[in-house]
Every structure is written in structure tokens, then in C-alpha cells.
Amino acid sequence: MTFNGSTPIRQEIHALWKLAWPMIVGQLATVGMGVADVAMTGHKGVMDLAAVSLGTALWTMVIVTVIGIMMAINPLVAHEMGAGRHANIAHMMRQAMWKALFIGLLACAALNAATLVFDTLDLEPSLQAMATRFVHVISAGMPAFAMFRTLQGYSTSINQTKPIMLISLGGLAFNIAANWLLVYGNWGAPELGAIGCATATSIGLWLMLAAMLIWIRHDPAYRASDPFVRWDWPHWGEILRMMRIGLPIGVTYFAEVSAFASVGLLVARFGVHATSAHQIALNFSSVIFMVPMSLGLALVTRVGLGLGQNDPRQARFASWVGVGISLAFALLSAIGIALLRYPIAALYTSDPAVQAITVDLLLLAALFQLSDGMQVAAASAVRGYKVTRTPMLIHLVAFWGISLPLGCILGYGWLPAWFPGAPAGPMEASGFWIGLVVGLTFAGVALAWFLARLSNQRVG
């Protein structure tokens, strides 16, 4: 892509942004469903909010792992697109949809089984029952979500991002309306509280999948690589090849999100207020994270297209432009969160105790924006090279080797009093978030180093 009077950097920013901005809107709309769930139940009652918080902790761990596994389609389609092999894309997508169906069903079963973890926590019986039922209901949308994410990766990689944006916005509108009806019992609907959120989300995911299928079938932009013009039975060799790329990405995503979600479970023993505050801070951070995540998805496509065209220098150039844009946004978001942490807390809940804890956690969330922006962009660029195992190992060390152990030490007050700088007592939720800041910083630095090494090797 070129345009008169532009530098190569401006050209690459333009190309990346053209891909990324509809995905940013779409991702914000998707995560907005979770924001609506938390905000609307937060004003329903502390018990409903805590149930959503606990159920969402499990849901998030499983759903983000599925996102990672499904992401194998992004670099594969981008490479084929760069090489002009459209027929290969159609066949590949049919196999990817079979993979998505199987993974979605497996994830549904795993999510329901994961509710057994509530038995190990010292929860009020009514809270445990509500959180468990929330998970049972929302898990019904998992197969639809897996297939939708596969179609989203395909659409993104052939430069068609508008459908993702519009369908996700439609899903958000449905979710808010359905929550208004089912959480509060408006217009004669049953008043289901937290369970109403789960019902709305599950139905919304199936509607989004149906909308994406209809769009692909009728939009001429998909005609050259339309995967639904014929039927293919599963080809297990090809599905396993996709799994070899996607599974390490899924483990990578799981390592990060499970660290955050595990913190939600670990702080539950500090009470309902700490649990709710953690979920609010995490929920808002997730909204902000959708921007660098969307830039990262666009970056996978840009790097994959460069490599598919046998231009490793362009792939390297696109990688570092993407990292730079992500860091610039991270700096702005860090400043914004730090300055607006009080009104953000008030937006989610009117409970003074929850607000006080939330404000402290949001300040820590502001601190890790730069590290988070760097790690997601660098990891996405590496995936554009179809390299997924090293980012997986880095994330496992960062979150399970650093963040969670350090969080437990600080949060539960395990640091000996004689240790220099030891806090006077348990730091509770704030201690766990400090551990997350340190882990993200390690991941960002390590992934940037690996990207530099990998991209230079490919150039030769």
C-alpha cells in the first residue's frame, strides 16, 4: 500500500490502522457485554455482583484459551492470502470450523466441570449456588463462540473487518437489552439477577454466529475464498496441524488470563468487597486491553502477508511499527486510568467499600499498561511468523513463575518481617496486583528481545 508524500512508517501505520480500527470497535463491543453484566449486576446487589465475578473468573479462563486456540487460523490464512492461494483458504476454513465445533464442545464440558473449584473456597452456600448456576447457563454459548472466533480470524486475515465490528455492536445492543429485561425483571420478564446476565450472553453468542454466517454467504468480498460452497468431512491431519500452531497460543492466553482469574479466586477469602473490587478493576482493564489486542490481531495479518509475499524485511518493519503504536496507546491509557480512577470506580458500583479498594487496584492497573502493551504486540508479531511455543514458555514463566507466587507472598503477608521493605501486614488484593505488574514487565521485555532475534534471523 502506498500514497503520495508518505513515509514508509506512515504507510504501515495507515495499513495497520485500516485493519485494526473496526476490530477495536468490535472487540470493545464484545468485552462491553462483560462490562454490562458487571455494571448492571453491581447495581442489582453485592451478592449478584460477587456471583458474576466468580463465574466470570472461570468463564474468562476458558473463553480466552479458546480464543488462543482459534487464532491459528489468522497467520495461516494471512500467509495463503499473501501468496494468492484463495482455494487453499476455503478448504482450510472448512477444517477450522470442524476444529472450532469440537473445541467449543470440549470447552463447554470443561467449564462446567471447573465449577468444582468453588467447593474448595470458603463461600457462602447461596453465593456458591448462584455462581455455579451462572457458569452452567453461560457455558451453552461456548460452541457458538469458538466458531464465531474462527470466522472472525478468517475475515480479518482477508482484510474484511467491517462485519466483525457491526455484528459485535449488534451483540452488545442485544446483551444490554436482554440484561435490562432479565436482570431486573422489566416488562414482565423474570427477575433472574446474575443468571439473567448468563442467559443474555449465551443467546447473544449464537445470534452473532448466525449473523456472521449469513454475512459471509452473501457478501461478494468473500466469494473467492468462501468456505461454505461445498462440504468437507474432518481431515484430522490438517486439524492437528492447526492445533500444533493454535494450542501453544491457547496455553499462552491461558497463562495470562488464569493468573488474573486465579487472583479473583484467591482474593475471595478477603470478602465480597475485595472480590467485587478485583472484578471491577479487571473488567475495566480488559476493556482497555481490547485496543492493543486488536492492534495485535491486525499485526498478525500484516506480518503474515509480508512473509507470504516472501518479504521478510517488510514483516520485520511491520512488527516494530506495531509495537510502537501499541506502546504509544499504552502510555495514554496509563495516564487516563490514573487520573480517572475515582469516577471509573463510581461508574461500576455505589458501594463505598468496594469503591475504595477499586481505586487502589486501578492505580496498579495503570502501572502495567506499558508492559502489557509491549508484550501483546511483540507476541502477536511473533505469531505472524507462525512461531508460538516460545511466547507460550515466556508467559508461563511470567505469570505462573513470577506473578502468582509473588502475589501470594505479598497478598497473604508471607514475606518475613526481617526482609528489607517488607510490608507491615498482608497487602490483600493490592499485593496480588503488584505481582501481576512484575510478571507483565518480564513478559514484555522477554518477548521484545525474542521478536528482535527472530525477525533479524529471517532477514538474514
Image (spheres, rainbow, N blue to C red):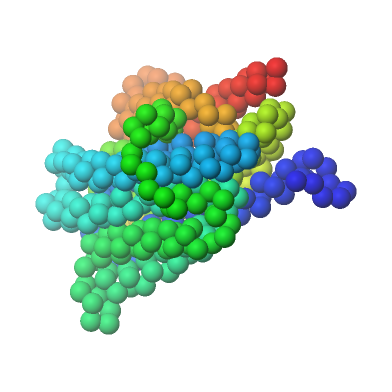
Q: Determine the residue located farthest toward the left in the rendered image.
A: 125
Q: Where 134 sits versus 456, above or below? A: below
**Position of residue 293 in the picture relative to residue 306 (left or right):** left
Is residue 320 visible from the viewing direction of this image?
Answer: no
Is residue 164 visible from the viewing direction of this image?
Answer: yes
Q: Determine the residue located farthest toward the right in the rendered image.
A: 5
Q: Residue at x 60, y 26 (%)?
A: 451
x, y percent for residue 223: 55, 55
Q: Residue at x 83, y 42 (%)?
A: 7
Q: Residue at x 40, y 41 (%)?
A: 96
Q: Choose top left, top right, bottom left or bottom right for residue 99.
A: top left
x, y percent for residue 436: 43, 35
Q: Choose top left, top right, bottom left or bottom right for residue 409.
A: top left
x, y percent for residue 137: 22, 57
Number of on-image labels: 0
Q: Residue at x 34, y 32 (%)?
A: 236
Q: From the viewer's side, name the closer residue of 356 and 86.
A: 86
x, y percent for residue 306: 66, 34
Q: Where 114 sits versus 280, above or below? A: above
Q: From the viewer's side, name the closer residue of 54 and 246.
A: 246
Q: From the viewer's side, name the closer residue of 420 and 459.
A: 459
Q: Determine the residue located farthest toward the front in the rendered image.
A: 230
Q: From the viewer's side, name the closer residue of 100 and 325.
A: 100
Q: Quadrant of the C terminus?
A: top right
